[in-house]
Image (cartoon, rainbow, N blue to C red):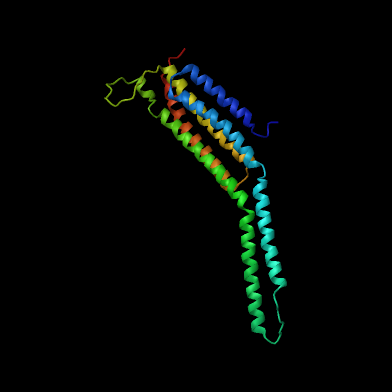
Amino acid sequence: MYRHLDPDKVIETAQRLETRVKERFPDSSLSKLTSELVVVAQQSAERADEIARPHWPLRVGTGGFILLMFAGLGAGLLHLDIEWRLKDIGSLIQFIEAGTNEIVLIGAAAFFLLTVEQRYKRRRALKALHELRSLAHIVDMHQLTKDPDRLKRAGADTASSPARAMTLFELSRYLDYCSETLSVIGKIAAVYAQFFEDEAALTAVDEIEDLTTSLSRKIWQKLSILDAKAPKA
Protein backbone atom coordinates (compact mmCIF):
# COMPACT_ATOMS: atom_id res chain seq x y z
CA MET A 1 0.00 0.00 0.00
CA TYR A 2 2.79 2.43 0.86
CA ARG A 3 5.36 1.14 -1.64
CA HIS A 4 4.09 3.10 -4.63
CA LEU A 5 3.35 6.76 -5.21
CA ASP A 6 -0.37 7.19 -5.83
CA PRO A 7 -0.99 9.75 -8.62
CA ASP A 8 -4.47 10.46 -7.23
CA LYS A 9 -2.97 11.42 -3.88
CA VAL A 10 -0.54 13.76 -5.63
CA ILE A 11 -3.48 15.40 -7.40
CA GLU A 12 -5.35 15.74 -4.10
CA THR A 13 -2.30 17.36 -2.51
CA ALA A 14 -2.02 19.82 -5.40
CA GLN A 15 -5.73 20.66 -5.13
CA ARG A 16 -5.49 21.21 -1.39
CA LEU A 17 -2.48 23.47 -1.88
CA GLU A 18 -4.39 25.44 -4.53
CA THR A 19 -7.31 25.94 -2.12
CA ARG A 20 -5.06 27.09 0.70
CA VAL A 21 -3.21 29.59 -1.50
CA LYS A 22 -6.44 31.02 -2.91
CA GLU A 23 -7.87 31.44 0.57
CA ARG A 24 -4.76 33.27 1.79
CA PHE A 25 -3.76 35.13 -1.42
CA PRO A 26 -6.87 35.09 -3.64
CA ASP A 27 -5.66 37.59 -6.25
CA SER A 28 -2.00 36.60 -6.36
CA SER A 29 -0.18 35.12 -9.31
CA LEU A 30 0.86 32.27 -7.01
CA SER A 31 -2.78 31.20 -6.75
CA LYS A 32 -2.96 31.05 -10.56
CA LEU A 33 0.26 29.06 -10.61
CA THR A 34 -1.10 26.48 -8.17
CA SER A 35 -4.25 26.18 -10.31
CA GLU A 36 -2.00 25.39 -13.26
CA LEU A 37 -0.14 22.89 -11.08
CA VAL A 38 -3.39 20.98 -10.48
CA VAL A 39 -3.92 20.72 -14.24
CA VAL A 40 -0.35 19.52 -14.72
CA ALA A 41 -0.77 16.93 -11.96
CA GLN A 42 -3.93 15.59 -13.59
CA GLN A 43 -2.29 15.46 -17.00
CA SER A 44 0.77 13.71 -15.57
CA ALA A 45 -1.36 10.89 -14.17
CA GLU A 46 -2.97 10.36 -17.59
CA ARG A 47 0.30 10.65 -19.49
CA ALA A 48 2.16 8.32 -17.15
CA ASP A 49 -0.58 5.72 -17.51
CA GLU A 50 -0.49 6.01 -21.31
CA ILE A 51 3.29 5.72 -21.37
CA ALA A 52 3.20 2.63 -19.16
CA ARG A 53 0.66 0.83 -21.37
CA PRO A 54 1.84 -1.11 -24.45
CA HIS A 55 1.40 0.83 -27.69
CA TRP A 56 -0.20 -1.98 -29.69
CA PRO A 57 -0.60 -0.22 -33.07
CA LEU A 58 3.09 0.65 -33.01
CA ARG A 59 4.05 -2.86 -31.91
CA VAL A 60 1.92 -4.53 -34.59
CA GLY A 61 3.25 -2.23 -37.30
CA THR A 62 6.85 -2.74 -36.23
CA GLY A 63 6.43 -6.51 -35.95
CA GLY A 64 4.81 -6.72 -39.37
CA PHE A 65 7.59 -4.69 -40.97
CA ILE A 66 10.26 -6.89 -39.39
CA LEU A 67 8.50 -10.04 -40.60
CA LEU A 68 8.30 -8.65 -44.13
CA MET A 69 11.98 -7.75 -43.99
CA PHE A 70 13.06 -11.25 -42.97
CA ALA A 71 10.57 -12.82 -45.39
CA GLY A 72 12.15 -10.82 -48.19
CA LEU A 73 15.59 -11.98 -47.10
CA GLY A 74 14.45 -15.60 -47.02
CA ALA A 75 12.83 -15.34 -50.44
CA GLY A 76 16.01 -13.83 -51.85
CA LEU A 77 18.11 -16.68 -50.47
CA LEU A 78 15.73 -19.30 -51.89
CA HIS A 79 15.96 -17.85 -55.37
CA LEU A 80 19.68 -17.34 -55.22
CA ASP A 81 21.50 -19.68 -57.54
CA ILE A 82 24.70 -20.65 -55.80
CA GLU A 83 27.28 -22.82 -57.48
CA TRP A 84 29.48 -24.24 -54.78
CA ARG A 85 33.02 -24.42 -55.97
CA LEU A 86 35.33 -25.31 -53.18
CA LYS A 87 38.27 -24.74 -55.47
CA ASP A 88 37.27 -21.08 -55.82
CA ILE A 89 37.97 -20.07 -52.23
CA GLY A 90 38.08 -16.35 -53.04
CA SER A 91 34.50 -16.34 -54.36
CA LEU A 92 33.31 -18.31 -51.34
CA ILE A 93 34.92 -15.82 -48.96
CA GLN A 94 33.36 -12.89 -50.80
CA PHE A 95 29.96 -14.56 -50.65
CA ILE A 96 30.29 -15.16 -46.89
CA GLU A 97 31.39 -11.57 -46.30
CA ALA A 98 28.49 -10.20 -48.33
CA GLY A 99 26.02 -12.44 -46.49
CA THR A 100 27.44 -11.45 -43.11
CA ASN A 101 27.15 -7.76 -43.95
CA GLU A 102 23.53 -8.21 -44.99
CA ILE A 103 22.70 -10.05 -41.77
CA VAL A 104 24.38 -7.35 -39.67
CA LEU A 105 22.49 -4.59 -41.48
CA ILE A 106 19.18 -6.39 -41.16
CA GLY A 107 19.87 -7.07 -37.48
CA ALA A 108 20.65 -3.39 -36.90
CA ALA A 109 17.46 -2.38 -38.71
CA ALA A 110 15.44 -4.86 -36.63
CA PHE A 111 16.94 -3.51 -33.41
CA PHE A 112 16.12 0.05 -34.48
CA LEU A 113 12.52 -0.92 -35.18
CA LEU A 114 12.18 -2.84 -31.92
CA THR A 115 13.23 0.24 -29.93
CA VAL A 116 10.85 2.62 -31.72
CA GLU A 117 8.21 2.30 -29.01
CA GLN A 118 10.74 2.90 -26.22
CA ARG A 119 12.10 6.00 -27.93
CA TYR A 120 8.60 7.29 -28.62
CA LYS A 121 7.65 6.93 -24.96
CA ARG A 122 10.96 8.45 -23.84
CA ARG A 123 10.33 11.50 -26.00
CA ARG A 124 6.88 11.98 -24.48
CA ALA A 125 8.19 11.57 -20.93
CA LEU A 126 11.09 13.97 -21.44
CA LYS A 127 8.77 16.59 -22.94
CA ALA A 128 6.49 16.38 -19.89
CA LEU A 129 9.46 16.51 -17.51
CA HIS A 130 10.82 19.57 -19.29
CA GLU A 131 7.48 21.24 -18.59
CA LEU A 132 7.88 20.47 -14.89
CA ARG A 133 11.41 21.87 -14.91
CA SER A 134 10.11 25.13 -16.38
CA LEU A 135 7.34 25.23 -13.77
CA ALA A 136 9.90 24.92 -10.98
CA HIS A 137 11.80 27.93 -12.33
CA ILE A 138 8.55 29.91 -12.47
CA VAL A 139 7.99 29.18 -8.76
CA ASP A 140 11.50 30.44 -8.08
CA MET A 141 10.68 33.67 -9.93
CA HIS A 142 7.66 34.17 -7.65
CA GLN A 143 9.75 34.04 -4.49
CA LEU A 144 12.68 35.96 -5.97
CA THR A 145 11.61 39.43 -4.79
CA LYS A 146 10.25 38.28 -1.43
CA ASP A 147 13.12 39.67 0.66
CA PRO A 148 12.71 39.09 4.42
CA ASP A 149 15.50 41.54 5.20
CA ARG A 150 13.28 44.43 4.08
CA LEU A 151 11.01 43.83 7.08
CA LYS A 152 13.86 44.76 9.39
CA ARG A 153 15.74 47.38 7.40
CA ALA A 154 13.59 50.23 6.23
CA GLY A 155 14.77 52.17 3.25
CA ALA A 156 13.53 54.29 0.39
CA ASP A 157 12.30 52.35 -2.61
CA THR A 158 13.31 53.20 -6.14
CA ALA A 159 10.93 53.58 -9.02
CA SER A 160 11.60 49.97 -10.03
CA SER A 161 11.40 48.43 -6.57
CA PRO A 162 8.80 45.65 -6.25
CA ALA A 163 5.82 46.25 -4.01
CA ARG A 164 6.35 44.89 -0.51
CA ALA A 165 3.07 45.07 1.37
CA MET A 166 3.17 41.69 3.15
CA THR A 167 3.43 41.34 6.87
CA LEU A 168 5.94 39.00 8.43
CA PHE A 169 3.27 36.30 8.80
CA GLU A 170 2.00 36.70 5.24
CA LEU A 171 5.49 36.58 3.80
CA SER A 172 6.22 33.45 5.81
CA ARG A 173 3.08 31.74 4.48
CA TYR A 174 3.83 32.85 0.91
CA LEU A 175 7.34 31.40 0.99
CA ASP A 176 6.07 28.22 2.62
CA TYR A 177 3.52 27.81 -0.18
CA CYS A 178 6.29 28.24 -2.75
CA SER A 179 8.29 25.51 -1.04
CA GLU A 180 5.29 23.18 -1.01
CA THR A 181 4.65 23.88 -4.68
CA LEU A 182 8.21 22.85 -5.50
CA SER A 183 7.76 19.67 -3.49
CA VAL A 184 4.59 18.77 -5.41
CA ILE A 185 6.43 19.37 -8.70
CA GLY A 186 9.08 16.88 -7.60
CA LYS A 187 6.42 14.30 -6.75
CA ILE A 188 4.70 14.76 -10.11
CA ALA A 189 8.04 14.03 -11.78
CA ALA A 190 8.42 10.91 -9.65
CA VAL A 191 5.12 9.60 -11.04
CA TYR A 192 6.75 9.30 -14.47
CA ALA A 193 9.74 7.44 -13.02
CA GLN A 194 7.42 5.00 -11.28
CA PHE A 195 5.60 3.95 -14.45
CA PHE A 196 8.41 4.25 -17.02
CA GLU A 197 11.78 2.77 -16.13
CA ASP A 198 13.90 4.39 -18.81
CA GLU A 199 17.44 5.52 -18.04
CA ALA A 200 17.12 8.92 -19.71
CA ALA A 201 13.74 9.56 -18.07
CA LEU A 202 15.00 8.49 -14.65
CA THR A 203 17.98 10.82 -15.01
CA ALA A 204 15.65 13.70 -15.89
CA VAL A 205 13.46 12.94 -12.86
CA ASP A 206 16.51 12.94 -10.57
CA GLU A 207 17.58 16.29 -12.03
CA ILE A 208 14.15 17.77 -11.32
CA GLU A 209 14.25 16.44 -7.76
CA ASP A 210 17.67 18.03 -7.30
CA LEU A 211 16.43 21.30 -8.81
CA THR A 212 13.31 21.54 -6.64
CA THR A 213 15.30 20.62 -3.52
CA SER A 214 17.91 23.27 -4.29
CA LEU A 215 15.28 25.96 -4.93
CA SER A 216 13.39 24.97 -1.81
CA ARG A 217 16.60 25.25 0.21
CA LYS A 218 16.88 28.91 -0.82
CA ILE A 219 13.33 29.50 0.35
CA TRP A 220 13.99 27.89 3.71
CA GLN A 221 16.97 30.17 4.19
CA LYS A 222 14.57 33.10 3.89
CA LEU A 223 12.14 31.40 6.27
CA SER A 224 14.96 30.99 8.78
CA ILE A 225 15.60 34.73 8.60
CA LEU A 226 11.89 35.41 9.16
CA ASP A 227 11.82 33.04 12.10
CA ALA A 228 14.72 34.93 13.68
CA LYS A 229 12.80 38.19 13.25
CA ALA A 230 9.55 36.83 14.73
CA PRO A 231 8.76 38.08 18.25
CA LYS A 232 9.35 35.48 20.92
CA ALA A 233 6.45 34.44 23.11
Residue 227 visible, this angle: no
* Quarter of the rendering containing residue 50: top right
**Which quarter of the rendered picture does the N terminus lie within?**
top right
Q: Is residue 30 above or below residue 87?
A: above
* Quarter of the rendering containing residue 30: top left
| Residue 54 position within the rendered picture, expressed as x and y whole percent measured from the top left | 67, 44
Q: Is residue 82 left or right of residue 146?
A: right
Q: Which residue sits furthest top?
A: 233
The residue lying at 66 percent from left, 34 percent from top is 4
Q: Is residue 35 left or right of residue 69?
A: left
| Residue 156 position within the rendered picture, expressed as x and y whole percent measured from the top left | 27, 21
Front residue of this view, candidates 163 and 77: 77
The residue lying at 50 percent from left, 16 percent from top is 23
Q: Is residue 109 above or below residue 184?
A: below
Residue 215 visible, this angle: yes
| Residue 42 position within the rendered picture, expressed as x and y whole percent measured from the top left | 58, 31
The residue lying at 66 percent from left, 62 percent from top is 69
